[in-house]
């Protein structure tokens, strides 16, 4: 009862907030289509977007075939990583849970590199499956190992298990890659999260999974609220805790795997954005999830645009920009977050 | 009545301590022998098979045979010495970190020290085309900056182990991201050199870097031993240590500095070879039984690990790989096992 | 300064070879692969190499260890080295992949990694590697190579022809070196190779002269960028320019690495040549179409869209024979090209 009244009270403020974020996202998406290493005038961008004819001129090719797919990938992948982080933090009741820190993104990335270089797989529609496999394998491994022992999956253990899995995978990958220069080149491209060079074929390959995953994720709001009260209480409320957890992990793996298949391993977005969302709308996951879904692509696209502007005509990869911006936020969460010491 | 119990417990304590010391001595001697044997063995195998006698005679200048001397002193001794020194340095640094932060998971390779050193060195290789001692200097600077940064960030009424580790992991992620960026900036040729360096290999060291590390190990290992008494004090917990009159923060800083310098120089010589620092201490403790925490046994275990990993990497595998690939492939499962079995204290610090 | 080496010098880990040398160094020189050189004059021998250093020996060297392309150059004059060190697998190295290497010890197949122990067992009396004036180093022994590998130079004197402004000069340099080592450079098959090369140059010049409006640009598409080669640092492109082909000089090469100008894909239309010279080290017949699918703006280079793309032997040529083969395919491409497509 009380939760629904608070929901009603909040809805009056949070609903419009959501609309505001939509407007903000649209603005930044437009900025991302307008800015690039080639300067294209606003009228030309608008006419290209109006005509949707990529062959009209070189500038419309750049706008429609380079910048629009890149922006769309940024929006979808950003939303996916933010929501995946929020779900993980809810399910594990752990403020440091994040697909990047838990090694899930690097698990997916390693499998993508392996598929491309060793198995010769081409096309995002095919290697996205390898990304799922890598993501789910890393997630299960890390979570299982961190949960062993009496105290369960503590933040430190989750982070360390993630680091260990990442480091072990990196060792094996290096062993494979050192013997093959083409593979080394491919790895360099995949090692840093970036939106550069990601166009329509990759978008087409991953978009269905991302969209399905995002829709599915919105169904978790209520169950995550239940879990937040503790496993026993959640069970008392009639929830199937284990079933929830398995379903949540599958959704997380799909979101993180597809996002990584699209733009490589990106850390910190999924960690920081849910905290901001929680700060804005309180502990209710029915609001945290949609807020994360809109805030994350805003952050990701902003970082991407920033990376294109600060060192122009060269480009900073979005993963690097987010690393630089995200590390202080991470430190702040560790220092000031009310985290159980165990 | 009380007097007799005191006497008998003191006697029991003495007996236990004597037994402990004896075991520590035996283990240390055995490890020294093993390291010595491996050191000679690495110099025996290769395109020329040499006998132990030939190797020892050549190293000690007992016999002059130009072709054997060229192979042993010119080619194999620098690699073997690098493996030995890197192992000693990483083993000692790892156990110091673990004891200082009272957490078996806190080793320099996981709290961002290696990544900081790596980032500085890679930046030098890629942007400044640095080589030789300049790379060493950069790695050292990077490690020190990373350690200071983490110390400052983790400091809040003292350095709590778990906070230091978490911040270290965050910093490692941050540095690794920048390393990835540097690699994409690199020409492929440089990238291959950088990757090779990043994985860790003992065969690449140049003479000046190696001499620097050997000197550092010779000086800093005794320093670390002297500080070990204080380390023991710290192990009792900050309050107890304060009561013993140890100025805790200062001692911590001094010990950390020793460990950081050892790590940085080892990283400069062989690249950020992962997991050696992590596993050396716990293995040594298992061998020592109750007399845990010896820096010398941990250093010797580190040397054993690197020498064995190098033998495996270069001579046993079908294609020679960087030593770090072997330590990484063996170390990661060990870390996961460690995580799965640590107790509450271990995880929480 | 390894960075002054062209990018993409493909390399691979060395393969462990069966059959190692023995430590016992008897004076017996009856090794493998010295048949051709055994007819060498007795000496004394001397050679002025690319660094300006004069190397002298009492006896003409016969047991040579050479870097990949340099070994191919010596072999084209009938001199078989006893050992080769390469920057990549000898099965993929552009200079070595079609040569019969039986009886030659492979001492390294990765840049910076040379098995000096094995090299010592070969008891070489000469090491041959290109001299790189900008880096002041010989091939495979530049800054950043393993310290252990650099000990190769302690085994025997090292000589090399300077990498400069022309492949013709480089090939001539190795002809001189081979001659000093006793190769019969006037043997009929060797003369035939040189003649074929000269004919190829004549045909190339004629084809180029017939299309005065034709321009070419040397390019390499990559995931993140499109690279345009700077002829200033590519001796074979300078040779093409000398023979009349208008190879475009990019106007703003990367200051840190002037071998190339880096174009972002958004600016891929900056240069519009009539013929694309595609970096031969990664060129496959399918490459052009693959990049057309992968990068929406690659086919905005009109010559690429029209399929006027030909492999360019980037940075590896050492012999008259290889140069002749490459020139013949280039001549065909020039003849087929439309000199108005890029305008």
Image (cartoon, coloured by chain):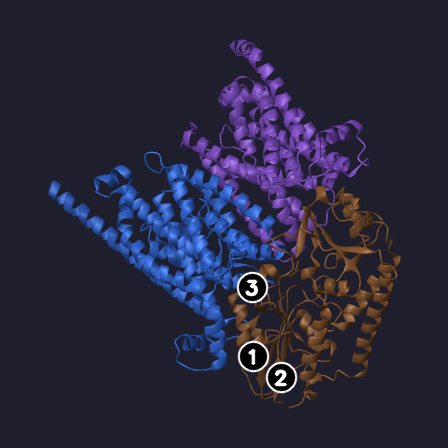
Chain colours: A purple, B blue, C brown
Location of residue C279 (image quadrant)? bottom right
Location of residue A125 (image quadrant)? top right
Q: Which residue is mark 3?
A: B316
| Residue C236 spot, x, y in % from top left | 73, 64
Q: CA distance from mark 2 to mark 3?
A: 36 Å
Question: Disc 2 vs disc 3: Cβ atoms closer than 8 Å?
Answer: no
> Looking at the image, can residue B9 be seen?
yes
Location of residue A84 (image quadrant)? top right
Question: Disc 2 vs disc 1: Cβ atoms closer than 8 Å?
Answer: yes
Which residue is at the front of the view, B274 or A44? A44
- Tags 2 and 1 both on a single chain: yes
Q: Chain of mark 3?
A: B
Answer left or right for B275 relative to C78.
left
| Residue C159 spot, x, y in % from top left | 61, 76
> Looking at the image, can residue C102 be seen?
no
User: Helix, strand or loop at disc 3?
Assistant: helix
| Residue B47 spot, x, y in % from top left | 56, 73
Q: Which residue is mark 1?
A: C156
Q: Chain of mark 2?
A: C
Give the residue drawn at x 31%, y 54%.
B224
Q: Dot 1 surroundings within 10 Å: few (below 14), some, or many (20 or more)? A: some
Q: Dot 3 surroundings within 10 Å: few (below 14), some, or many (20 or more)? A: few
Which residue is at the front of the view, C267 or C220? C267
Q: Which residue is mark 2?
A: C61
Q: CA distance from mark 2 to mark 1?
A: 10 Å
Viewer-nearest of discs 2 and 3: 2
């Amino acid at each position: 009862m009380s939760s629904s009244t608070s929901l009603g009270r909040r809805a009056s403020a949070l609903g419009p907030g959501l609309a505001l974020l939509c407007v903000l996202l649209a603005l930044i998406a437009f900025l991302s289509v307008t800015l690039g290493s080639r300067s294209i005038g606003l009228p030309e961008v608008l006419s290209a977007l109006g005509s949707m004819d990529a062959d009209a001129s070189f500038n419309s090719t750049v706008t429609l075939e380079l910048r629009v797919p890149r922006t769309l990938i940024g929006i979808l992948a950003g939303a996916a990583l933010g929501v995946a982080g929020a779900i993980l933090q809810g399910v594990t009741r752990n403020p440091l849970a994040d697909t990047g820190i838990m090694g899930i993104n690097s698990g997916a990335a390693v499998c993508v590199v392996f598929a491309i270089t060793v198995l010769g797989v081409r096309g995002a529609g095919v290697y996205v499956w390898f990304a799922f496999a890598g993501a789910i394998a890393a997630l299960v491994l890390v979570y299982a190992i961190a949960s062993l022992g009496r105290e369960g999956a503590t933040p430190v253990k989750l982070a360390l298990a993630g680091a260990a899995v990442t480091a072990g995978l990196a060792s094996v990958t290096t062993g494979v890659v050192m013997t093959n220069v083409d593979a080394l080149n491919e790895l360099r491209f995949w090692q840093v999260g970036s939106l550069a060079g990601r166009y329509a074929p990759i978008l087409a390959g991953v978009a269905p999974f991302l969209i399905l995953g995002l829709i599915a994720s919105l169904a978790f709001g209520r169950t995550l609220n239940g879990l937040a009260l503790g496993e026993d209480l959640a069970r008392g409320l009639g929830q199937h805790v284990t079933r929830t957890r398995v379903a949540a992990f599958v959704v997380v793996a799909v979101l993180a795997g597809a996002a990584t298949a699209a733009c490589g391993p990106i850390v910190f977005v999924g960690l920081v954005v849910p905290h901001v969302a929680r700060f804005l709308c309180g502990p209710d996951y029915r609001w945290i999830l949609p807020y994360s879904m809109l805030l994350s692509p805003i952050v990701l696209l902003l970082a991407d645009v920033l990376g294109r502007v600060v060192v122009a005509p060269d480009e900073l990869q979005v993963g690097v920009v987010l690393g630089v911006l995200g590390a202080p936020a991470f430190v702040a969460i560790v220092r000031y977050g009310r985290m159980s010491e165990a | 009545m009380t007097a007799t119990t005191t006497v008998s417990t003191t006697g029991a304590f003495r007996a236990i301590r004597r037994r402990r010391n004896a075991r520590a001595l035996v283990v240390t001697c055995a490890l020294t022998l093993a390291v010595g044997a491996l050191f000679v063995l690495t110099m025996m195998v290769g395109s020329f098979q040499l006998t132990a006698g030939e190797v020892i005679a050549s190293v000690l200048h007992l016999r002059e045979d130009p072709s054997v001397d060229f192979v042993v002193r010119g080619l194999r001794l620098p690699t073997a010495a690098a493996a030995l020194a890197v192992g000693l340095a990483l083993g000692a640094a790892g156990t110091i970190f673990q004891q200082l932060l009272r957490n078996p998971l806190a080793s320099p390779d996981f709290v961002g020290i290696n990544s900081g050193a790596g980032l500085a060195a890679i930046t030098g290789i890629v942007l400044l085309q640095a080589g030789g001692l300049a790379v060493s200097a950069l790695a050292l600077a990077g490690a020190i900056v990373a350690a200071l940064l983490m110390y400052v960030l983790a400091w809040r009424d003292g350095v709590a182990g778990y906070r230091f580790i978490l911040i270290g992991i965050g910093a490692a992620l941050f540095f690794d991201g920048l390393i990835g960026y540097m690699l994409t900036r690199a020409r492929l040729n440089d990238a291959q050199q950088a990757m090779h360096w990043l994985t860790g290999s003992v065969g690449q060291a140049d003479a000046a870097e190696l001499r620097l590390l050997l000197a550092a190990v010779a000086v800093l290992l005794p320093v670390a031993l002297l500080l070990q008494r204080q380390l023991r004090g710290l192990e009792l917990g900050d309050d107890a240590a304060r009561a013993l009159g140890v100025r805790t923060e200062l001692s911590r800083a001094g010990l950390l500095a020793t460990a950081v310098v050892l790590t940085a120089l080892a990283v400069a010589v062989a690249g950020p070879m992962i997991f050696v620092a992590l596993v050396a201490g716990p293995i040594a403790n298992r061998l020592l039984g109750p007399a845990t925490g010896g820096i010398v046994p941990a250093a010797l275990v580190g040397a054993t690990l690197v020498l064995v990993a190098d033998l495996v990497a270069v001579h046993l595998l079908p294609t020679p790989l960087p030593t770090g690939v072997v330590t990484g492939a063996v170390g990661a499962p060990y870390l996961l096992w460690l995580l799965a079995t640590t107790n509450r204290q271990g995880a929480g610090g | 300064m390894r960075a002054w080496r062209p990018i993409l010098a493909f390399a691979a880990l060395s393969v462990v070879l069966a059959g190692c040398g023995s430590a016992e160094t008897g004076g017996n020189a009856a090794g493998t692969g010295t048949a051709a050189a055994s007819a060498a004059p007795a000496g004394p021998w001397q050679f002025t190499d690319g660094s300006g250093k004069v190397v002298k020996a009492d006896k003409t060297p016969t047991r040579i260890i050479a870097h990949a392309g340099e070994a191919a150059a010596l072999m084209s004059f009938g001199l078989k080295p006893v050992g080769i060190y390469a920057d990549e697998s000898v099965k993929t190295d552009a200079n070595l992949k079609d040569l019969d290497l039986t009886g030659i010890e492979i001492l390294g197949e990765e840049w910076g990694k040379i098995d000096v122990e094995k090299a010592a067992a070969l008891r070489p009396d000469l090491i041959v590697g290109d001299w790189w004036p900008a880096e002041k180093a010989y091939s495979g022994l530049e800054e950043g190579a393993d310290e252990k590998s650099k000990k190769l130079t302690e085994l025997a004197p090292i000589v090399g022809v300077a990498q400069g402004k022309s492949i013709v000069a480089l090939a001539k340099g190795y002809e001189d070196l081979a001659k000093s080592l006793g190769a019969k450079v006037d043997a009929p098959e060797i003369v035939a190779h040189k003649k074929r090369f000269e004919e190829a140059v004549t045909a190339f010049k004629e084809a180029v002269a017939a299309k005065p409006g034709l321009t070419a640009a040397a390019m390499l598409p990559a995931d993140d960028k499109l690279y345009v080669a700077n002829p200033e640092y590519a001796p074979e492109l300078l040779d093409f320019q000398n023979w009349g082909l208008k190879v475009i000089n990019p106007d703003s090469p990367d200051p840190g690495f002037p071998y190339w100008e880096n174009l972002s894909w958004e600016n891929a239309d900056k240069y519009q040549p009539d013929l694309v010279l595609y970096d031969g080290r990664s060129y496959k017949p399918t490459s052009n179409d693959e990049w057309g699918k992968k990068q929406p703006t690659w086919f905005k280079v009109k010559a690429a869209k029209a399929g006027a793309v030909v492999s360019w032997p980037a940075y590896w040529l050492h012999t008259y024979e290889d140069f002749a083969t490459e020139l013949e395919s280039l001549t065909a491409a020039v003849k087929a090209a439309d000199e108005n497509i890029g305008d």
